[in-house]
Image (tube, rainbow, N blue to C red):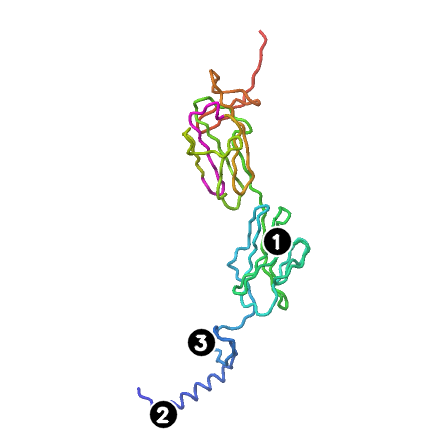
Amino acid sequence: MKMIGSDLFLMKITILSMLASTGLSRVKRQDDSHSYPVGENEIEPLIIDRGPYFDKSVSRNVTALVGKTAYLGCRVRNLGNRTVSWIRHRDLHLLTVNRFTYTSDQRFSALHNPQTEDWTLLVRYPQKRDAGIYECQVGTTPPIGHSMYLSVVEPITMLLGGPEMYINQGSTMNLTCVVRHSPEPPPSIYWTHDQQEINYDSPRGGVSVITEKGDITVSYLLIQRATEKDSGRYTCHPSNANPKTLTVHVLSGEHPAAMQHGGQLRLEYPFAVIFLSITVTLIAP
């Protein structure tokens, strides 16, 4: 339907009346710092200034290794000119305000890049006593906070069959190193024999390592056709955990495949170590 000039004028008057009846709001455009009067029911690509709020997609649980710097992240949207503080819940101690440290413990500091909305609490050389709740707080009225939990763990390294192992000459030596309670798999694990790093490509041959990484990381050192020269102290060195050592005795001659050791009967097989407890009863004739 074709509209004449008078009809268009009446339509404009009607629209203005509707806007007046619904009231006006002042909102901010996403790409502009100025406010514009717009009807509440008008559909526009506009964002209401809602004040600071936390990005809840950031993980609230952080696990750190003993002695390795911990990073607690806090992302604050629409901060404006408010302050961001970090507080330790255990003693309600104020640690940082913006990028300033307010504790005598200089292991704590705040990290912030002005180009981002992230405020990160750094805990250098964390110890197990540092575990607990930390709160990222914004200085609104009243203040708003976002709590996080820091876990500090110390990985455990185990060598199965230690501290001493007995095997027969000519058999396959299987040393198994297990790393537990690590927030991430060790980037690398290497082995030493009598404090010398083992060369897997040596002319001797028959030496290999298999490492399976996961929540529990396992590294297998396999030495085929063991000789007396293979006796000695073997150490597993995970890159993010303490090393562990055991002593291997390679038996020559007519020694049996099983030896009595420490009240247990130990049988050696290429890929397993079986322990059988035994009880001996002597009966007089």
Q: Nearer the viewer, residue 52 or 114?
A: 114
Stretch in magenta: 212-230
The reply to whether the magenta stretch includes residue 140 is no
Depicted 192 relative to depicted 257: above or below: below
Single out the residue that lies furthest toward the left: 1
Q: Which mark is on residue 66?
A: none
**Labels 1, 2: front one:** 1
Q: Position of residue 193 (x, y in %)?
A: 51, 31
Label whose residue precedes the other's in the sequence (3 or 2): 2
The amino acid sitting under disc 1 is: Ile
User: In what element is the residue under mark 1?
Assistant: strand
Single out the residue that lies furthest toward the bottom: 6
Q: Position of residue 84 (x, y in %)?
A: 60, 63
Whole-number angstrom distance, CA of label 1 to CA of label 3: 42 Å
Q: Position of residue 83 (x, y in %)?
A: 61, 66
Q: Position of residue 176 (x, y in %)?
A: 49, 33
User: In what element is the residue under mark 3?
Assistant: loop
* Residue designated by label 2: 5
Depicted 213 relative to depicted 57: above or below: above
Q: Nearer the viewer, residue 137 or 219?
A: 219
Q: Is 253 left, or right, of 103 in this rendering?
A: left
Depicted 12 relative to depicted 142: above or below: below
Q: Quadrant of the N terminus?
A: bottom left
Q: Quadrant of the C terminus?
A: top right
Whole-number angstrom distance, CA of label 1 to CA of label 2: 69 Å
Q: Quadrant of residue 5?
A: bottom left
Label whose residue precedes the other's in the sequence (1 or 3): 3
Label whose residue precedes the other's in the sequence (1 or 2): 2
* Residue designated by label 1: 133
